[in-house]
């Protein structure tokens, strides 16, 4: 019997290099990602001309490079899985960006010939203490890989030789670049893709050398602005603003802001920072809003999301070296102050805010951004004094200089926040004025700013009358009825929007408090972990009876830690990354169990029975955010708990679920204070928390003061928010006549 073997036609490279990598811009981005994976800290891309005057592309990096065996084993092997087996780079532990083994064939998409020159590898052979580096050169004549030829029959000339220097890195020279494929639009797309990589300003990963960061420099004289581009510098100038600050010779802070809509601004603080010398700040202020980009050739919403998630935060560099954990944590209390709704900037900046038209000085920090919206660092130079790194190299020892540094940086950031609030207010007014002017041109009449909606409707009425007057009587009546109905909707919606705006402010205040809660819980979890270990060791030294007591306390600590972890996981769902969360299928039973855990202390203390045995395992809501499911469950469970405590009798809550006509039907019953049928709809109205006036009066009589702080009087927003969530997903919610032995019954239907 004959044995057959597969052969590979050269046409495969066309499929890999040209079909999977559709454009030259994507192909070049893939090659730069390979440089990042090779632990390069700098990549230079040059669009130049070859000896024949044709475009060529040269990509050089200072990464680990490759030796001859690496090229032979991995580069020359199609679809190798070496990146799948090792998902982190060798030196800095960077998450690898490629796994399919086709990135190298991107060069075929770029040109007909590739020359690779690479020096050794930092992980190469070692002779004594001296690394042996070798230089490898290989030519890839892609034009010879034509359909009909077997890949293994085509030679790629190569050479190798040992070298004495310790420089490692790789140079790719691509010639035979097809004319006409590179356009300014594609060049800009390339920069937006690579901006995510240059946002890496340094990181420390366990088990690896400290990553000093990554940058890209591009020389492209044929493209707009491409003579020489430092991509990191461009990134810092692409967002809403760039903030720089330093301490002058008299100890005052000199802050400079170059930002969208306000141009260049400067302030010198009246407060002195006498302990600060040789210190400067440079921060990019990046806002997740396309309208607040100064350079959309560098930033896109997609790349900005990754930049803020991975690299947002104000770092500290001490004598050129990054100090951890600054930049990974909220060391400036920015998110803490956002959560506490800090609005007043303090005496000096309050006075500054008073000089800006339209800004409310007492609320001038209302537009404060998350700490991750600031990308950059505070640089502490060689001549600075008063900063002593801790022995474990994690942060500085507390000192007056460190306190002044924090005040200085916050002064600069708060000043820029006030100016951004000014920009937002002026921008909103500008848009409103533009719309008003356009309307005035249309009607050839000036109108008062406070009467725009009213004037617009009056104009429509006048125009409608002109049209309706020429219609037959029957049509005229119908036409006017439709118009009256439409204008009534507009007027009522406008009034409702004003009420909803007030409601949203309150909701925003509540949601930002979750950031503080999360921050504080993380700290508390660390304390509990230390206390648990201390008690465990202490118990071993005590007599049996005392040992059991200490072990019981330790068990309570473990239970508390578990509950806090559950709460932390829930609050993280509505943190800074929630805007990019995706709706999906959410199992009901598992979420109910976690919500029950949240209320376990209250339920146990007041002997409340929560029965969810009638929730099947197969009930799941479709196309909904997990955070929305928790919002619904936490609100309705909280209401039932308050109600059964207020009633004071048998404290029972039951949750059941079933499938009915393609919908999931969740029913919540309780033995609480009940609700009169006339109020079944009223309780969903914002700001109506107790329509009959008996819930909270009874609750206060039967609940301890410290517990009332946990579940006490509501804002009247909870059920309104729940209803909005459910209606948005095509469901329904209603109170109905309760079943026998129950005082309240709430029915929720969701797909």
Image (cartoon, rainbow, N blue to C red):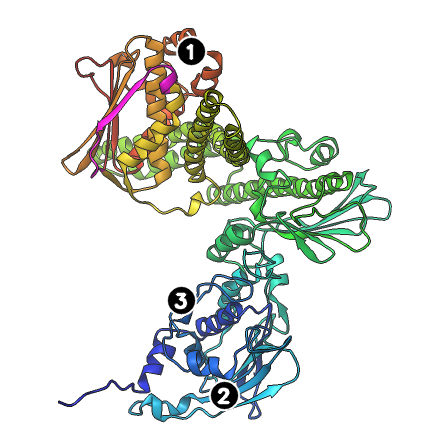
Under circle 2, the secondary element is strand
Q: Which residue is mark 1?
A: 703
Looking at the image, residue 240 sits to the left or right of residue 399; the answer is: left
User: Is residue 533 visible in the rendered structure shown here?
Assistant: yes
* Separation of residues labelled 2 and 3 (CA atoms): 26 Å
* Separation of residues labelled 3 and 1 (CA atoms): 58 Å
Q: Nearer the viewer, residue 428 or 541?
A: 541
Q: Nearer the viewer, residue 85 or 516?
A: 85
User: Is residue 714 visible in the rendered structure shown here?
Assistant: no
Q: Which residue is mark 3?
A: 85
**Residue 245, position as x, y percentages in the image:** 73, 49
Q: Which residue is mark 2?
A: 138
- What residue do we see at 59% from left, 61% from top? 211
**Residue 378, position as x, y percentages in the image:** 69, 50
- Against 377, residue 718 (above or below) is above
The stretch in magenta equals 603-619
* Separation of residues labelled 1 and 2 (CA atoms): 80 Å
Q: Do the residues under discs 3 and 1 have CB atoms within 8 angstroms?
A: no
How many numbered discs, if any?
Answer: 3
Indicate the quadrant where residue 645 lies. top left
Question: Residue reaching furthest right?
Answer: 250
**Residue 507, position as x, y percentages in the image:** 46, 30
The C terminus appears in which quarter of the rendering? Answer: top left
**Residue 348, position as x, y percentages in the image:** 75, 34
- What residue do we see at 18% from left, 16% from top? 739
The N terminus appears in which quarter of the rendering? Answer: bottom left
- Against 44, residue 703 (above or below) is above
- Against 604, residue 310 (above or below) is below
Q: Is residue 607 magenta?
A: yes
Q: Is residue 226 magenta?
A: no
Q: Do the residues under discs 2 and 3 have CB atoms within 8 angstroms?
A: no
Q: Do the residues under discs 1 and 2 have CB atoms within 8 angstroms?
A: no
């Amino acid at each position: 019997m004959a044995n057959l073997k597969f052969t590979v036609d050269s046409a495969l490279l066309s499929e890999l290099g040209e079909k999977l990598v559709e454009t030259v811009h994507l192909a070049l981005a893939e090659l730069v990602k390979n440089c990042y994976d090779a632990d390069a800290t700098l990549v230079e891309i040059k669009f130049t001309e070859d000896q024949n005057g044709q475009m060529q592309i040269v990509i050089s990096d200072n990464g680990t490079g490759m030796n001859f065996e690496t090229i032979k084993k991995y580069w020359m092997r199609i679809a190798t899985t070496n990146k799948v087996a090792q998902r982190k780079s060798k030196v800095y532990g960077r998450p690898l960006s490629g796994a399919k083994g086709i990135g190298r064939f991107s060069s075929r998409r770029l040109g007909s010939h590739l020359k690779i020159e690479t020096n050794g590898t930092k992980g190469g052979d070692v002779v004594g203490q001296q690394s042996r580096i070798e230089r490898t050169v290989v030519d890839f004549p892609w034009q010879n890989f034509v359909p009909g030829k077997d890949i293994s029959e085509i030679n790629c000339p190569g050479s190798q030789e040992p070298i004495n220097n310790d420089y490692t890195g790789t140079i790719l020279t691509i010639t035979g670049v097809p004319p006409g494929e590179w356009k300014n639009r594609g060049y800009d797309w390339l920069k937006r893709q690579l901006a995510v990589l240059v946002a890496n300003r340094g990181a420390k990963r366990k088990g690896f050398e400290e990553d000093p960061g990554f940058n890209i420099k591009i020389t492209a004289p044929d493209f707009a602005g491409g003579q020489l581009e430092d991509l990191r510098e461009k990134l810092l100038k692409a967002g809403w603003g760039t903030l720089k600050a330093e301490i002058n010779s008299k100890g005052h802070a000199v802050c400079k802001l170059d930002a969208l809509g306000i141009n260049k601004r400067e302030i010198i603080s009246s407060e002195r920072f006498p302990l600060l010398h040789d210190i400067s700040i440079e921060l990019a202020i990046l806002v997740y809003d396309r309208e607040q980009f100064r350079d959309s050739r560098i930033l896109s919403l997609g790349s900005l999301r990754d930049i803020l998630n991975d690299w947002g935060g104000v770092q500290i560099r001490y004598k050129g070296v990054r100090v951890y954990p600054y930049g990974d944590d909220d060391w400036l209390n920015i998110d803490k102050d956002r959560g506490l709704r800090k609005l007043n900037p303090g005496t000096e900046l309050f006075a500054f805010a008073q000089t800006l038209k339209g800004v409310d000085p007492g609320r001038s920090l209302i537009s404060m951004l998350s700490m991750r919206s600031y990308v950059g660092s505070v640089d502490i130079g060689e001549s600075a004094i008063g900063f002593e790194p801790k022995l474990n190299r994690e942060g500085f020892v507390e000192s007056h200089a460190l306190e002044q540094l924090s005040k200085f940086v916050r002064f600069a950031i708060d000043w820029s926040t006030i100016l951004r609030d000014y920009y937002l207010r002026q921008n909103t007014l500008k848009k409103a004025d533009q719309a008003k002017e356009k309307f005035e041109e249309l009607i050839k009449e000036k109108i008062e700013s406070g009467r725009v909606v009213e004037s617009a409707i009056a104009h429509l009425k006048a125009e409608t009358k002109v049209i309706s007057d020429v219609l037959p009587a029957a049509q005229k009546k119908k036409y006017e009825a439709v118009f009256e109905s439409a204008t009534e909707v507009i007027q009522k919606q406008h009034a409702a929007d004003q009420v909803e705006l007030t409601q949203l402010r309150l909701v925003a205040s509540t949601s930002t408090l979750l950031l503080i809660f999360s921050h504080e819980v993380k700290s508390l979890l660390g304390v509990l972990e230390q206390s648990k270990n201390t008690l465990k060791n202490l118990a071993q030294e005590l007599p049996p009876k005392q040992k059991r007591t200490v072990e019981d306390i330790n068990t309570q600590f473990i239970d508390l830690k578990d509950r806090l972890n559950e709460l932390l996981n829930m609050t993280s769902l509505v943190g800074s990354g929630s805007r990019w969360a995706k709706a999906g299928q959410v199992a009901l039973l598992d979420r109910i169990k976690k919500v029950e855990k949240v209320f376990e202390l209250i339920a146990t203390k007041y002997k409340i029975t929560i029965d969810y045995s009638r929730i099947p395992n197969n009930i799941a809501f479709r196309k909904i955010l997990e955070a929305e499911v928790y919002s619904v469950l936490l609100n309705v469970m909280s209401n039932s708990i308050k109600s059964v405590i207020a009633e004071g009798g048998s404290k029972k809550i039951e949750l059941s679920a079933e499938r009915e006509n393609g919908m999931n039907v969740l029913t919540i019953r309780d033995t609480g204070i009940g609700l009169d049928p006339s109020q079944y709809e009223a309780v969903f109205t914002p700001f109506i928390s107790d329509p009959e006036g008996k819930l909270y009066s009874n609750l206060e009589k039967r609940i301890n003061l410290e517990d009332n702080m946990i579940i006490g009087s509501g804002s009247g927003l909870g059920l309104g928010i729940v209803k909005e969530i459910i209606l948005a997903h095509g469901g329904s919610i209603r109170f109905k006549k309760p079943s026998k032995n129950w005082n309240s019954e709430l029915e929720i239907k969701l797909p």
